[in-house]
Image (cartoon, helix red, strand yellow):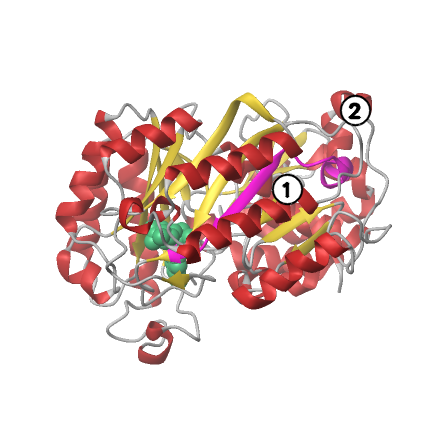
Amino acid sequence: MLLKSTFTPLFTVIPTKTKPLKFSRFTISNALTQQCPQPARQNASSSTSLLLFHKLPPTSAYIHLPFCRKRCHYCDFPIIALGSSCSTPKNANNDPRISNYIETICREIKATKLNSSNSPPLQTVFFGGGTPSLVPPQLVSSVLDSLSSKFGVCNDAEISMEMDPGTFDATAMKELMNLGVNRVSLGVQAFQEELLKACGRAHGVDEVFEAVEMVKSCGVENWSVDLISSLPHQTPSMWEESLRLTIQAQPTHVSVYDLQVEKDTKFGGLYSPGEFPLPSENQSAEFYRMASRMLSDAGYDHYEISSYCKSGYRCKHNSTYWKNKSFYAFGLGSASYINGVRFSRPRRLKEYMSYVQNLEDEVMKNCTEYGSTIDAKDLAMDVIMLSLRTSDGLDLKSFKEAFGDSVMLSICEVFRPHVESGHMICLDEQRRNFEADEFISEKAGFLRLSDPDGFLVSNELISLAFGAIAP
Ligand SMILES: C[S@@+](CC[C@H](N)C(=O)[O-])C[C@H]1O[C@@H](n2cnc3c(N)ncnc32)[C@H](O)[C@@H]1O
């Protein structure tokens, strides 16, 4: 059975966005105030890293820029709809809603307490939304300046921005590149006019092609396309066409999300998953298989449940989430993960503004200052859930060293039938395939979900592991 697990962003509003994976089971309520000194970080061997990663000072920052022209019918992100007159950063230039928000985010960055005087510079920055490409480049620049003066940003940092077709021109693209933006994530979603309309997108297919051309002609080397499958009235041939046109555009990265019908959205009021005009579960699974097959055939590595890339173009920022590493987050509704604590900021603008004011007034604890210890079971479940999303899979040796023999063995026992059925693959330490009957020997190095059949039932298999760890 297909479980809707492809769309699970970890950086905003965890309780709603991760529903299928039951985040409440492993929300970590407190954390370690002691951070690892730099030498320990550098020396962290692969076998100790599972226990260390979440304690290390963050080297990634997610910045939520919530402005959109209008809300898409499937979207329940914390956004602020500006209206269609605001279709480019030029029109948005003098919009006080944007400049006031950017000023607040810069204040939030400044008011964030560092737990150590030698915190490392940022290696990744991700501007997500909303529609970050609606924010005038000079305001993006002030956010980057704030990050730079607070944390430092590495010269070779990956700086990504989500950009919507129809919201930027070549001048804006070049200005952003001059600021250091070196990775673009284009929200395409579909290549059919009727589907874009049905989704309430503020752009059409022509603008998709224009945006692709713009990104390429400006010389952005590292860029991604977002697509959504299982949209209402989407047919297999439409999906095949969207994949084909994406491949023809030659992005270095593609994200394929299965539509998640969120309760408080227009789609939530209109549709029920699995019922017409949405595809059946079997049809959704077919869409997933088709994406996996077509993109793999075109030379993309399916490196995470919903992510594909050309060699060398994995998204470094998202990889911090999947490796359970800590990260900062700033802005409306965004969720940071620091010292083992996932902390969500308010989703409403007024409350977010007061939150930042309180931070500055030191009325409330800073999100970097919570707690002291972390529950090992919660951590083990985080590690399983996140690592099984990736083609790298679960590192059994590190897992055993971090959580002990018996937990590792019970996980292996639970997964044994699924290795036998082919939904999971066991690899040795050199990442060579194991025969199923050799499984659970000393030679076992990694466990991963098979592609596509194992990825399709990831939620079920992850839940089984949770049951074994916390019956
Ligand atoms: C933060 S959104 C990007 C917003 C950006 N303004 C855009 O629309 O392209 C990141 C991606 O999440 C995906 N997404 C958002 N809501 C979704 C949902 N309910 N189900 C599946 N995918 C969703 C879309 O593919 C979107 O491009």
Residue reaching furthest bottom? 269
Label annotation for residue 408: none
Residue at coordinates 80% horizontally, 53% vertically from top-left? 370
Pinpoint residue 98: horizontal percent, then vertical percent: 43, 53
Confirm whether the magenta stretch covers residue 311. Answer: no
Looking at the rendering, the quadrant in which ligand 1 lies is: bottom left
**Residue 320 occupies quadrant:** top right
For residue 174, side relative to residue 462 (left or right): left
Quadrant in which the N terminus appears: bottom left
> From what the image shows, is residue 116 above or below residue 405?
above
User: Which one is nearer the viewer's eye here, 420 or 279?
Assistant: 279
Q: Is residue 223 left or right of residue 444?
A: left
Element under label 1?
A: loop
Specify whether tag 1 is near ligand 1 (CB below 8 Å). no
* Disc ID at residue 38: 2
User: Mark 1 touching mark 2, by CB under 8 A?
Assistant: no
Distance between the Cα atoms at labels 1 and 2?
17 Å
Q: Which mark is residue 327?
A: 1
Range drawn in magenta: 50-67
